[in-house]
Image (spheres, helix red, strand yellow):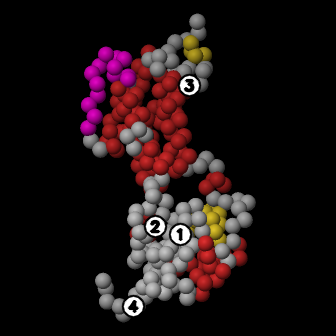
Amino acid sequence: MTATCGLCETPLEHGYLCPGCTLATARRLDRMPKLYAGLEAFLQPGGRASAQYGRTQAVDGALPASEPVLSLRGPGGIVGVLEDWRSAMQSDRGWREPVIAGNTERRIVVAARALSINLDWIAASWPMAGAFAEELRDLERDVASIVNSSDPSERGSRLGACPAVDPSGAICGAILRHYPGQPAVTCRWCGCTYPPASWADLKTLIDEDEKGAAICRTPGDQAFSRIREEGYASVPTPSSEQEEPCPSESSPAA
């Protein structure tokens, strides 16, 4: 009976993966360490922006991490999938259980390399080859759905860091994007909405932040006041008792 590729179901004379799916699987294995590293930037959508823009006041408590990213970077994510398949492959070849050592990044490199070295045998002789290749494909898609989109319009146009201020005076800093057909710009991190009438002032605030001018912001700022009237009120601002004066050029360094 004619065999079929375990991934694309192309008829085969022998083996379990066709040459095309074998090559695609090899490339996915090669990309796994890079995919793991690329997810780091998505752990906390607003986490790095605050440091980048020099905020003087921190939000109470750490920002919540993205659960899908944590899952992919955690024990049951990329490293778990690769190590489980490596263990199964070595068991079926009559080899001893692989030694697990090093940090997660190193473990991914080692497991992916071991599977790559044995990929010819996997494609030709391993009945689990199709399930293995399919899980790698799905894993790559899960990561790609977070770090990149195949359709540029789905990513939207990058505007800059969200200037919304929380009760402690800290600026949100998450990246704002405008998507085709979207009537207003909404921060997917803090939920602040910016309608079209506020976009000129929004650009002013973003430009100030990018220049490092807005180390702290008060409701007296003209652009800040106008943008609150256009939809910024959903994000509470610090009261006068909570505000700290912006440091002047003559202020001594902390």
What amino acid does circle 2 point to?
Ala
Which percent across, then down, holds residue 121?
41, 19
Separation (CA) of disc 2 from disc 1: 7 Å
The tag earlier along the polypeptide, 4 or 1, is 1
Q: Badge 1: how crowded within 10 Å, few (<14), some, or many (20+)?
A: many
Residue occupying image coordinates x 55% and y 88%? 220
Provide the secondary structure element on which disc 3 rests: loop
CA separation, marks 4 and 1? Answer: 24 Å
Disc 4: which residue = 249
Eyeballing the image, is 89 above or below 59? above
Residue that badge 1 annotates = 161
Alpha carbons under labels 3 and 1: distance apart:
42 Å
Q: Name the amino acid type tagged 4.
A: Glu
Residue drawn at (40%, 62%) of the image:
62
Q: Residues within 10 Å of mark 2 (few under 14, many from 20)?
A: some
Query: Looking at the image, do the residues carrying marks 2 and 1 touch, with CB atoms under 8 Å apart?
Result: yes
Q: Which residue is mark 3?
A: 7
